[in-house]
Amino acid sequence: MGAKMLRRMFLTAGAGVMLAAMVAVVPASASAAPPGQRYTWTAIDVPGSAYTIPVTVNDLQAVVGLYADAKGPNQGFIEQGGRYTTVDYPQAVSTLAFGMTDLGEIVGEYSPSNGDDYGFIDWGGRFTTLQDPMADNVPSLGTTPQAVNNRGQIVGYYFDDTSTMHGFVYQNGQYRTLDCPGAGTGSDPSDWLTGYAGTYLGFVNDYGAIIGDCFEDSGSYYGFIYQDGSYNEIPNVPGASATYICWITDFGVTGGSYLSSDGSGVVGYVDHSGNYSTIEDPVGPYGIYVEGANNLGAMAGYYLDAKGKYNGFLMTQSH
């Protein structure tokens, strides 16, 4: 499924959740959002899918992500205005769509029949493979683009021949490796909960600010924002035992999900310069995963229902 989804699911593996049609934003501290601000919830559920996981939403309200049907392998999708389009790399066993520009350029990962993983760019159905020259193509590893901005910068991660994860930035045909301070070495990909070591890059905005995670040899990690050569560590959300930052808008607003230290489950959050607002499931403390957002305040993600199915959603501000 890809490291991004697996690390988010790590927060509460197997938790159940039910999501109502309206989700309230509840201030965690002095909130930049008006108290009681409400969002309209729209189900993102590929017809016939076993599960649907939206990863991000662009400024035209197009949602991109992945799903699986009864046959099993993952496929990418785009949803816009209720219309679903499959993203399917030619002759691939599975295709995962992770990022999309406002013009419709898509990046993600595909797996051919040999079990290796490769990155791709999709321009209107014209696919190009992305493979960092430093990557070691062993089964289930390789190169994984996670996001693309409107300037054509692509960020993601690759694994080298020691199974260490490295971040990369790709633009104009050139790859650049980014390794965060304190990054560990020698991942154990068979242990998807705690086995990763190295640098993961997950999102980039149009100003080149990059969201990532740094996984240390000790098994600990920290989130960061990288811009203009500097790594800035992201503190935990107040009341969190673990925080997963997923996105940053062009206005510097960040967000994602966190695991509450009081055991109440996974909660979404938005951070306006240190002013936090939480996004909670109003019917139970089971979990909501806010994977992406756009510059207009819309957010996309997924939840786990009582039957164990991952279901997608799009939240847009109510007026």
Image (tube, helix red, strand yellow):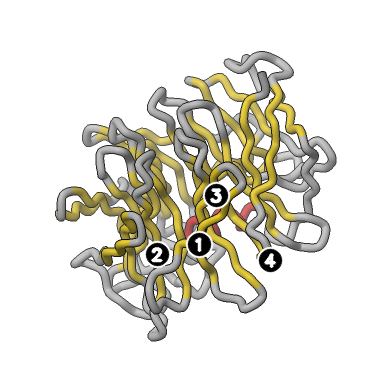
What amino acid is found at the position of numbered circle 3 in the picture? Glu
Closest to the camera, between mark 2 and mark 4, is 4
In this orientation, which residue lies closer to the viewer: 256 or 84?
84
Amino acid type of the residue tagged 1 in the rendering? Thr
Q: How many marks?
A: 4
Residue displayed at 50% across by 42% down: 62
Q: Which mark is residue 48?
A: 4
Q: Nearer the viewer, mark 2 or mark 3?
A: 3
Residue 163 at x, y percent in the picture: 35, 71
Secondary structure type for disc 4? loop
Q: Which residue is mark 1?
A: 86
User: In the rendered image, which residue does mark 3 sit on?
Assistant: 79
**Label 1, label 3: how many angstroms apart (C-alpha)?**
9 Å
Residues at marks 2 and 4, CA–CA distance in whole angstroms: 22 Å
The residue drawn where x is 50% and y is 75% is 190
16 is higher (above) or lower (below) than 228: below
User: Quick one: quadrant of the C terminus?
Assistant: top right
